[in-house]
Image: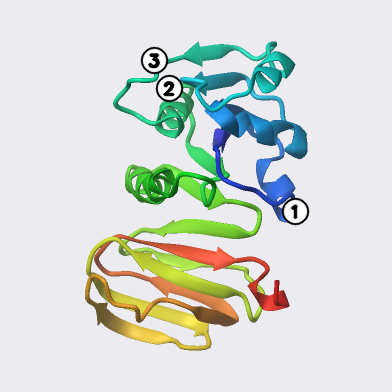
Amino acid sequence: MSRFTILLGGDIHRTPDLLAQVAGTRVIAADSGMRHAALLGLTPELWVGDFDSVSDELRKANSHVRQEVFPRDKDRTDGELAVEAALRLGATAIVAVGAFGGERPDHAHLHLTQAVRLSEKGIEVLLTSGRHEGTPLIAGRRHAFDYPDGTLFSILAFDALSGLTVTGAKWPLDAVEVPFGASLTISNEVLGRLAITLARGRALVLADRFGDRGH
């Protein structure tokens, strides 16, 4: 498996779990995501984007990193360009760091939907800020998680869900139908060994790694 870390522009928290997830991966920075490299002790092999959100200081400090510069007027985000570069280099698994928050909620939404699309193509994707983690759910597959009891999680749906089963949770579900836009799958808690199965639909699990500690 060829694992790549994509450094995106959202906020991050430096945690032992995050450091373990990016350890030993190949790294590509997307535009202002380069600012996370020093915090995580990473050296990207490639820096892509239009650099409109990059300070002169950051660019100078990382001038040794190979750059692919794109025009500001383009039809793809810097994050999407970074993912495409990773796939071009043979990525089979992607850790998208800084996928949540930041100044662009529209980009955060794209990261979620892009993760689901990539997973449907067989690419393993983890979205993370260090605090929050997002994992796409593949229809017809059982997904198990090692989150401790009390961890807060939600299942974010991108269309109607069918046959959704959740075990190891405070509020389990048994092969339920969830209409698009319903709040049934928001704000649950891990209680035991969390496992989720989805028969049909597109969705993603969003977990708060600090939710069990009152942060």
- In the foreground, 83 or 167: 83
- Residue 71's disc is 3
Q: Amino acid at mark 2?
A: Arg
Tell me the residue at 50%/57% (across/down): 134
89 above or below 68? below
Name the residue that disc number 1 marks. Answer: 15
Q: How many callouts does the rendering have?
A: 3
Q: CA distance from mark 2 to mark 3?
A: 20 Å
Query: First in sequence: mark 1 or mark 2?
Result: 1
Q: Amino acid at mark 1?
A: Thr
- The kind of secondary structure element at disc 2 is helix
- The kind of secondary structure element at disc 3 is loop
Q: Amino acid at mark 3?
A: Pro
For the N terminus, the image quarter is top right
24 above or below 67? below
Q: CA distance from mark 3 to mark 1?
A: 34 Å
